[in-house]
Amino acid sequence: MLPPLKLGLCGLGTVAQGMLTVLHDNREIVREKAGRDIQVVRVASRTEKPDVDLLGGSFSTDLATVTDDPDLDVVVELIGGEGVALDLVRRTLRAGKAVVTANKAILASKGDELLSLVREHGGMLAFEAAVAGGIPIIATLTRSLVANEIRLLAGIINGTSNYILTAMTESGQSFAEALADAQKLGYAEADPSFDVEGIDAAHKLTILGALAFGVGFKFDEVYTEGISEVSGEDIEYARQLGYQIKHLGLARTGPDGVQMRVHPTLIPEGHLLASVNGVMNAVLVRGNVTGDTLYYGPGAGALPTASAVVADLIDIARGNRPELPLMTRDNSVTLLGIEDVESGHYLKIPSLDKPGVFARVATLLSEREISIEAAIQKEQAIHTETQEAWVPIIILTQPVRESVMNDAIDALQQLPEIVGRIRSIRVEHLGDE
């Protein structure tokens, strides 16, 4: 049998502890699959945790004891964040070593630089755990579907947002109520903005898009919109129209370039992604050979994420280099701005209950060649400020360029009968293209 793969671990949080648990509990399985032992030699963290079994590894609060040890074969970075963790990964790759990380933030923002360090110094960078926890989506894109031209990625890739929308849909809770429950259950942080405003999902989509389409790691160019403005009314109206609202990460390639966006989305109730509920994740991948394939499972949590970390370690122990098509592909693909994207739209238009209002709305849309797919006009209510009777007009449009829709909304907003801000949510059918 080969000598042990010697690793240093940086960070001792929940995922790191999960990795140690997997290496301990599944030791025989790991040894058999890897062809040798995986030995924890050094562990470094800001805070010592005496109750955690380090599996024989020596502990230090100095990260340099890991990064500067010439005898280590691989460094596992599970600190998180972009400061110390980024410096650690850079330093390790410059030494020509292998790095395994779950850090989506540094990959999304600095992935091109880090892969350049791999090419320059001969190390390795593996990051299966960075996207969708226990779902092997990185391996799917870089190995299993590598013979395909990927045409579409559509994913529910943030469990917190999915839990909140599921609670709002199933229990009729408001966004604030569902968020409070998510925080009590540990699904959302005290400051939930990273999840509910779409930043976490955008990090993950950046990585998936880079691997699938060769656009590079361009997090700053991914259109990102959160779920905080989705209301119970929106969810109910969508249901009446035959749709569910999900927080979707979507990347699609076409003749004009690649679009990458994260936002609330109406999905037909019959689509498999519409039935992904709670904290679960799912990613739809469309290849030109395979067609649609769907990957479903836990997107976070100590053990599912640790499973992905250990999978990377086993791969390295076998002598396999991570397969990253991006390293050899042209990086000049055009990334489209949101204004050039075409999609259907759900419009909620608060209007006074007067004759002819719907006709004027329909005329403004028609003048811009926006076709109405469905429409409902709800019951009368009393506007709190004007005390006049008003009704919400709900319209579902056919696909239209975003810039055209924005112009139409601006024009509709100027009508004297419109008594509040028009709400717009994009619609995706995700059928064959």
Image (tube, rainbow, N blue to C red):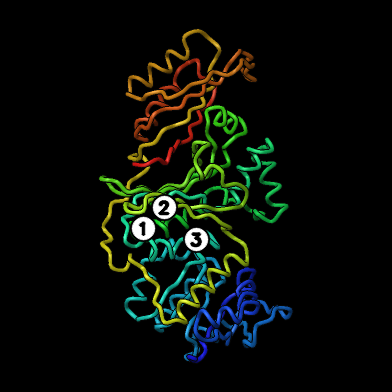
User: Which residue occupies 59% across, 53% down?
Assistant: 280
Q: Which amino acid, mark 2?
A: Val
Coordinates of residue 366 in the picture (x, y in percent): 35, 20
Measured as percent of width and height from the top left, residue 197 is found at 54, 48
Mark 2–mark 1 contact, CB under 8 Å? yes
Query: Residue 71 placed where, x, y %?
Result: 49, 91
The answer for how far apart the CA atoms under marks 1 and 3 are is 14 Å
- Disc number lying in front (2 or 1): 2
Residue 131: assigned label: 3
Residue at (53%, 42%) from the top-left corner? 274
> Considering the numbered disc 3 on the image, is that residue within a helix, a strand or a loop?
loop
Q: Earlier in the sequence, mark 2 or mark 3?
A: 3
Q: Residue at x 52, y 89 (%)?
A: 4
* Number of marks in the rendered image: 3
| Mark 3: few/some/many CA within 10 Å (<14, 14-19, 20+) | many
Residue 134 x %, y %: 55, 63
Identify the residue position indicated by label 1 in the image.
Answer: 212
Q: Write the residue at 44% across / 63% down.
A: 138
Identity, as a three-letter code, of the amino acid under mark 3: Val
In the image, residue 365 sits, relative to residue 288, either above or below, namely above
| Residue at the spot of label 2 | 285
Res. 216 image quadrant:
bottom left
Kind of residue sitting beneath label 1: Ala
Query: In this picture, is 257 found above or below 414?
Result: below
